[in-house]
Image (tube, rainbow, N blue to C red):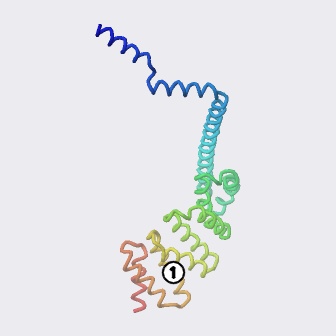
Amino acid sequence: MAEQGVSNERKKELEQIDPFQENLLKTLAYVKENQKQFLLILGGILLVIVIFSGIMFSFKNSERIASDLVATAVISYEKASDPVKGFQAVTADFDTIFAEYSNTSAGRMGKVKFAKICFDAGEYDRAFDLYKEALEMFEDEAGMKNFLLASLGHVSQARSDAEKAKSYFLEIETGASDLLKDEARFALAGIYEDANDTASSLKMYEKIVNDHENSIYRNIAESKIKDVQ
């Protein structure tokens, strides 16, 4: 009799729905009741996924195309017999890249490459504008920023604008990054020397000797210091 009593109690326990099953049934009932709304939400999620996938595919495809176009333009430039003819040969190609793929990484780097092409061809105004645009794009990248500041300094010198050149080189000289700092100091020394500011020029040469042991400008700086002494 005791065993029968236990079996009946156990049977009742098994017939009862546990909390997990009860919650699951309630959830299924709620979903069924609001099936239309859930289908709309699911459809919206799927639509977002499809759109995002499409954007990513388009971006990667644009990046690939831009990279190929820049590489082709550079190859065409290198085949030219001189910088001016090279500039003329690839100007239209780079204009297309900037018009259609300016937001890609390849397009941004293409702007830097073409700026150098312009500089070598004596197109200083266009080189300056391109380097300025590139500087805005790479403002947060310390190494690239110093490279572009130095490029702007050299272009400004080529445009006979010593004051503007000095401002760009000083930004490197006083900045936190050491990249191209010796080059900036050497350029500043020359600018001060041309302006007959011997003290400031000597100060830049001394910084090169003291702070840039392996600089390619070190020997020249040492010679300049000896000439003053």
Give 88 or 156, whichever is nearer the viewer: 156
Corner quadrant of residue 60: top right
Q: Is residue 199 left or right of residue 73?
A: left
Residue 229 placed where, x, y %? 39, 92
Give 226 or 70, whichever is nearer the viewer: 70
Q: Is residue 194 above or below residue 69?
A: below
Residue ID at (67%, 28%) = 36
Give 123 or 130, whichever is nearer the viewer: 130
The residue lying furthest to the left in this view is: 2
Q: Is residue 189 above or below residue 83?
A: below
Q: Name the residue beneath numbered marker 1.
A: 188
Residue 7 placed where, x, y %? 34, 11
Q: Is residue 71 above or below residue 210?
A: above
Residue 66 placed where, x, y %? 62, 48
Amino acid type at image mark 1: Leu
Q: Residues within 10 Å of mark 1 (few under 14, many from 20)?
A: many
